Image (spheres, rainbow, N blue to C red):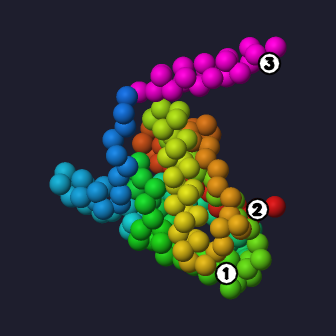
Amino acid sequence: MRSLIVPAIVGSAVFLTACEEGPKPPLKTAHSVADDQSQQGQTGTWMNAPARSNGADTRTLTSGSIQIDERILKACGNLPTAHFAFDSAAIEGTAAEALNALAKCFVSGPLSSASLRLVGHADPRGGVAYNIVLGQQRAGSVATFLSQHGVTENRMGTLSKGAFEASGTDEYGWALDRKVEVYLKD
């Protein structure tokens, strides 16, 4: 029986990989998205967009967000909303400000002995494997940023859900799907 299960699993993985849509373009940074917008005559950037109560960027449709668990917000106080560019794991601008404040809370603040769980998500438009990798890159970039600001790596765990929990059907919904969720690790 075991001899049939392993080839079936390997075959399924090969099939899913083969079904992926061709190669994807390189990941974009916030600067390249802003450059694209200015070349097309659009104004505003993802970093200056106002947030809705759910932490999602609603001014532009190219952003995702870093969403922080209510328990962390209660302990750390009001943290700025953090955003990153479409198809990107880059942390810049307001995202850096928010994560810097979060790091301070976990290094010398009320959560200095707590651990984090970082969960990366993507919208459903890429292939399965691509979205898993992108979600992991997003969670990993948040972990890297926090570790560079004093949070020890052994206090953070990362996970990617890719597009498995995505529910968007248009640009606005897809922007809500692109996120990193920050939780207290229980």
Residue that appears at 36% across and 33% down:
23
Instruction: Report helix, strand or loop for mark 2.
Output: loop
Inter-mark Cα distance, 1 to 2? 15 Å
Residue 181 or 173: which is nearer the viewer?
181
**x, y percent for residue 125:** 45, 35
> In the rendered structure, which segment of residues is drawn in magenta?
1-21
Q: Which residue is mark 1?
A: 107
Please tell me whether residue 165 is drawn above or below residue 141 in the rendered image: above
Q: Quadrant of the N terminus?
A: top right
| Mark 2 residue type | Lys
Instruction: Report helix, strand or loop for mark 1.
Output: helix
Q: Which residue is mark 3?
A: 2
Instruction: Report helix, strand or loop for mark 3.
Output: helix
Answer with the quarter of the image where residue 14 lies.
top right
Q: Which residue is mark 2?
A: 185
Residue that appears at 41% across and 71% down:
93
**x, y percent for residue 56:** 52, 57
Q: Quadrant of the C terminus?
A: bottom right
Badge 3: residue crowd in 10 Å (few <14, some 14–19, many ≥20): few
